[in-house]
Amino acid sequence: PGGVVTGVVAPPAYYQVPVAGAPGGSGGGVGGGAGMQVDAAAAAAAAYEQERVRIAIAASLEEENMRRAMQASLEEAERLKAARAVADAEQAALDAAIAASLEEDQRRRIRMQSAPSPASSPQTPRPPRPPSQSLI
């Protein structure tokens, strides 16, 4: 009979339903309005339970979204790892090609340095050709 339902399921204060002004809600009449207080308490308990379920569902959805984001992040990390391995292999191939080219250039230089130069090598003059008879 205070006009407020309390102590049923111990919902938070914002779920307490005022019943003053409802028929029998102020304690008048036969039974002192106990039926209205029970109905209001049941409504408050149902609203409290509904809110609790809504919060649980929201938390579950948030947890699922976080799990999906984590999974996507792990998959992206794997893709990046694979791309890095490919890039490393390509870089190794380029390094090997550059090294081979440098070795070939070095060998060519060594050959050119060790070969006698045309000016310093004694050449025997060719004997003069006999005049050709076919040009007449």
Image (cartoon, helix red, strand yellow):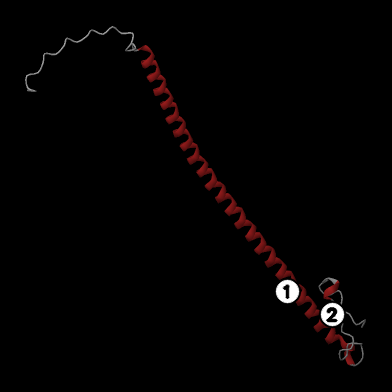
Q: Is residue 93 left or right of residue 54?
A: left
Front in this rendered view, residue 36 or 132: 132
Please give the name of the residue rendered at 58% of the width and 49% of the height, measured from the top-left corner: 74
On screen, residue 23 above or below 123: below
Graded by Cα atoms within 10 Å as few (under 14), some (14 to 19) or many (20 or more), the crowding at tag 2 reads: some
The picture quadrant where one finds residue 37 is bottom right
Helix, strand or loop under label 2: loop
- Badge number at residue 50: 1
Task: Count how many numbered circles sit on residues in the image.
Answer: 2
Of mark 1 and mark 2, the one earlier in the sequence is 2
Graded by Cα atoms within 10 Å as few (under 14), some (14 to 19) or many (20 or more), the crowding at tag 1 reads: few
Task: Write down the residue under mark 2.
Answer: 17
Q: Is residue 107 left or right of residue 51?
A: left
Q: Amino acid at mark 1?
A: Gln
Please give the name of the residue rendered at 40% of the width and 18% of the height, measured from the top-left corner: 109
The picture quadrant where one finds residue 94 is top left
Helix, strand or loop under label 1: helix
**Which x, y percent locates residue 14?**
84, 73
Q: CA distance from mark 1 to mark 2?
A: 15 Å
Front in this rendered view, residue 23 or 82: 82
Q: Amino acid at mark 2?
A: Val
**Which x, y percent locates residue 52?**
74, 69
Front in this rendered view, residue 101 or 4: 101
Please give the name of the residue rendered at 82% of the width and 82% of the height, measured from the top-left corner: 40
Please give the name of the residue rendered at 54% of the width and 45% of the height, measured from the top-left corner: 80
